[in-house]
Image (cartoon, rainbow, N blue to C red):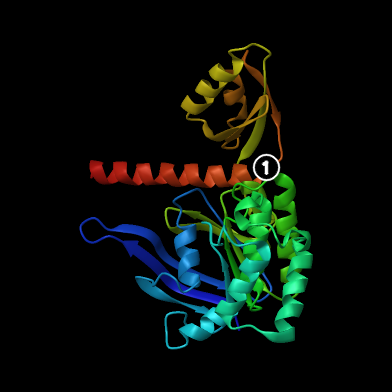
Amino acid sequence: MSSILATTLGRDFGKAPSVNRAVGEISLEIPRGELFGLIGPDGAGKTTLLRMMAGLLPPTRGSVRVEGIDPFGKEADHARDVIGLVPQEHSLYGDLSVGENLDFFADLYGLTGDDLRTRRDRLLSITRLGPFQARRASQLSGGMYKKLAVACALLHQPEVLLLDEPTNGVDPPSRRELWELLYEFVEGGMTVVVTTPYMDEATRCHRVALMDRGEFIALAPPQQLIDSLDAAVLEVALASVPEAREKATAVVEASPLVVASSPLGASLRVVVERGNEPAVAAELAGLGTLVPAAASFEDLFLTAIARRERDAKSSTARKEAA
């Protein structure tokens, strides 16, 4: 049985004629023990989709099952037993200490006795929060706060853990520690779904879905998606003149030959349709030198978005011309 099964799941906000389709009609199957990523920019629909999976936001259409349970049906209370949620916004009590927050959430779940103490001690150990039990949540660093939120969500030993942008605002070492925690949970058989706007985090997942405007535009293992990019990726080593970056950026953004671009330190990365490399090099003559580069997940995502927007504009133009 799948851990999560969504069938034509969608959610609208507002009323006609001003309906906002936050999530279209998503169909998705996530097996047990998978680390699944929802990748996309702000406003893509990631949080809305996650909240429907968590049973917090009823869908406008379609259905979702978590461990075979309808989180909006008669077994909704049981669904809360199998789901752990770490929301994007602050979910802890700042005036309570680390230990007091854990005790509070344990009371919410009705947990007591030796079993609770064993879980509590283990979570404090794996999150490295043991020495900070007396510190108020409001005084924790961003990374420590997120780890405490994860610990509170895991007290009742859920089978599925949903995390909404858990590394947002977290320093790099804490980001690495959080991902190491997620790997440990998955190795123990837990299903983990994480949303993130960070393209580099996509490669840490078993599979990812690229989301844009409430729809999946690709779904596969990260490396498989990168390998599927049918375009040439070039890196522009900019000339050592102050205005080189500004001029090169302007040329790249205006060029119909460039599919997508992004800055990279003192260079620019550009994605072009295969065969257009010499023409793009000519456009950038005097501003930088182009060298081939290996595709990254960010290149893939930017290209997918750019091509989607291009196709949408072409479709609109054809309709207007008809």
Q: In which quadrant is the C terminus drawn?
A: top left
> What number of labels is visible?
1
Q: In which quadrant is the N terminus drawn?
A: bottom right
Any part of residue 13 in sight: yes
Going by the picture, which residue comes out furthest to the bottom? 74
Q: Position of residue 166 (x, y in %)?
A: 61, 56
At label 1, which amino acid type do we have?
Ala
Give residue 144's quadrant in the image. Answer: bottom right
Q: Where is residue 75 in the image (x, y as percent from the top left)?
A: 47, 87
Give residue 108's quadrant in the image. Answer: bottom right
In the image shown, does 28 or 16 lie closer to the viewer?
A: 16
The residue that appears at 64% across and 70% down in the rendered structure is: 102
Q: Position of residue 140 (x, y in %)?
A: 66, 52
Q: What element carries label 1?
A: loop
Residue at mark 1: 295
In the image shown, does 285 or 180 lie closer to the viewer?
A: 180
Q: Residues within 10 Å of mark 1 (few under 14, many from 20)?
A: some
In the image shown, does 185 or 240 lie closer to the viewer?
A: 185
Any part of residue 283 in sight: no
- Name above or below for residue 105 compared with residue 255: below
- Name above or below for residue 14 compared with residue 315: below
Going by the picture, which residue comes out furthest to the left? 17
- Name above or below for residue 189 compared with residue 216: below
The residue that appears at 66% across and 63% down in the rendered structure is: 98
315 relative to 118 in the view: left or right = left
